[in-house]
Image (cartoon, rainbow, N blue to C red):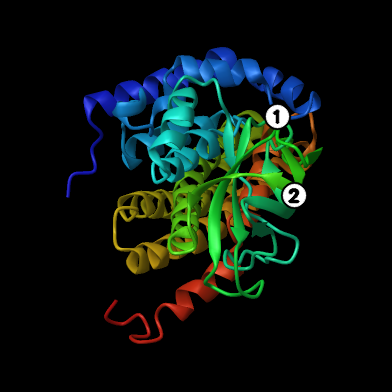
């Protein structure tokens, strides 16, 4: 199998890399984090590169690119610790809205492609514990009532894609529909806050809020699962970029910091630890490729593959983050040093879209028939 990137994909990588190097230097990121974790000018810059149009169908003014192109972009954004939620606004939202009624597609997809509208998924709830079918938000006659947590850039997004229950108990797999809600709609209230890594999120309250139906209860949960898998694949690619840059910073430090008159990178113990970090990075890269290539499979196969990827990525993120920070010593946790921010980002990512223990359970539940031997 050929894993080489095409010339167009490599050109896309180079363009994003230049944007990150020029317009998202570490000092700029610190300023954005202190200002709340989202900068509309950066979002406009991403739109100027065509990244917000990446997954939008060509019929609606997008580029109609696939999962591999998205992976390439997310790796480079990870190296720069870009906080603006491109995966949410440019990958997940178009994937869901492309399944919406024609008038809803025509109203929102061109605006997403042009960077004029930021639409994010608002699906997490206080009692969900990563379970996508645990939905307490209710929809009655096209009006929603409920609370969603940890909504990316929730107080500055233009609209939300909201899973809401039209029937059944809060933990039932059936009865979940997807709706589009504009942030300016009546009954929407947001409470913003910063996450540990500096990115922006919000609690979003819906109080008898009018909404537009994207998909009914016959497709709602299936589309929500697809959205989560797209998010996991995008995060896996981003994590590879984060870990690769964190390792590069560490190697540079080991070759610069001296003790007993020699660079500490010459110490055998640290060289072995660096080799272990590199091994985990390459395992993560392989699973990132695996996750991306499995997005087009049947739902049952796709769901298990993405959970497998998240387990490996979670283990790698924890190991790489901790080892690189420890090899730096005290400077590795100072806020003024870039390495600490890579560690924070890896720590947050391990908890998003389900932590390692959650996905280990998902993998186990999906391998009961064969115990994984013939999978």
Mark 2 and mark 1: Cα distance apart in space: 21 Å
* Above or below: residue 111 compared with residue 126: above
Q: Is residue 196 visible?
A: no
Secondary element at tag 2: strand
The residue drawn where x is 59% and y is 33% is: 249
The residue drawn where x is 54% and y is 75% is: 361
The residue most toward the front is: 141
Judging by the rendered image, the residue that carries numbered circle 2 is 208
Residue 370 lies, in percent from the top left, at 33, 85
Q: Nearer the viewer, residue 146 or 209?
A: 209
- Quadrant for residue 189, please give it: top right
* Above or below: residue 311 compared with residue 188: below
Task: Please give left or right for residue 263 compared with residue 332 in the image.
Answer: left
The residue drawn where x is 39% and y is 46% is: 99
Q: Nearer the viewer, residue 185 or 239?
A: 185
Q: Nearer the viewer, residue 1 or 269?
A: 1
Q: Nearer the viewer, mark 2 or mark 1?
A: 2
Q: Earlier in the sequence, mark 2 or mark 1?
A: 1
* Above or below: residue 75 compared with residue 96: above
Within 10 Å of disc 2 (Cα), the crowding (few <14, some 14-19, many 20+) is some
Secondary element at tag 1: loop
The residue drawn where x is 40% and y is 50% is: 288
Residue 156, numbered label: 1
Give the quarter of the figure containing the C terminus. Answer: bottom left
* Above or below: residue 162 compared with residue 341: below
Residue 43 lies, in percent from the top left, at 58, 21
């Amino acid at each position: 199998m050929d894993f080489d990137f095409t010339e167009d994909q490599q050109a896309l990588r180079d363009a994003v890399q230049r944007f990150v190097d020029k317009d998202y230097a570490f000092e700029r990121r610190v300023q954005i984090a202190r200002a709340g974790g989202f900068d509309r000018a950066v979002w406009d810059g991403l739109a100027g590169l065509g990244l917000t149009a990446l997954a939008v169908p060509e019929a609606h003014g997008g580029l109609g690119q696939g999962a591999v192109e998205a992976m390439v972009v997310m790796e480079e954004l990870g190296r720069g610790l870009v906080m603006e939620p491109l995966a949410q606004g440019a990958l997940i939202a178009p994937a869901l809205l492309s399944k919406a009624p024609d008038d809803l597609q025509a109203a929102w997809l061109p605006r997403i492609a042009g960077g004029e509208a930021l639409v994010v998924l608002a699906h997490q709830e206080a009692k969900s514990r990563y379970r996508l079918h645990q939905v307490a938000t209710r929809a009655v006659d096209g009006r929603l009532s409920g609370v969603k947590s940890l909504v990316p850039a929730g107080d500055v997004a233009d609209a939300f894609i909201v899973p809401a229950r039209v029937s059944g108990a809060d933990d039932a797999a059936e009865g979940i529909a997807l709706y589009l809600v504009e942030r300016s709609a009546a009954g929407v209230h947001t409470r913003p806050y910063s996450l540990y890594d500096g990115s922006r999120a919000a609690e979003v309250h819906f109080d008898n809020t009018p909404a537009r139906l994207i998909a009914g209860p016959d497709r709602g949960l299936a589309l929500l699962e697809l959205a989560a898998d797209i998010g996991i694949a995008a995060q896996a690619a981003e994590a590879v970029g984060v870990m690769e840059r964190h390792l590069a910073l560490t190697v540079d430090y080991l070759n610069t910091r001296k003790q007993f008159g020699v660079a500490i990178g010459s110490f055998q113990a640290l060289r072995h630890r660096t080799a272990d970090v590199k091994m985990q990075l390459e395992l993560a890269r392989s699973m990132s490729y695996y996750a991306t290539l499995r997005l087009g499979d049947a739902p049952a196969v796709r769901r298990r593959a993405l959970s497998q990827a998240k387990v490996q990525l979670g283990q790698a993120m924890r190991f790489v983050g901790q080892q690189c920070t420890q090899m730096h010593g005290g400077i590795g946790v100072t806020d003024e040093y870039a390495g600490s921010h890579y560690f924070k980002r890896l720590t947050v990512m391990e908890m998003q879209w389900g932590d390692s223990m959650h996905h280990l359970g998902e993998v186990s539940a999906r391998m009961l028939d064969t115990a994984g031997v013939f999978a």
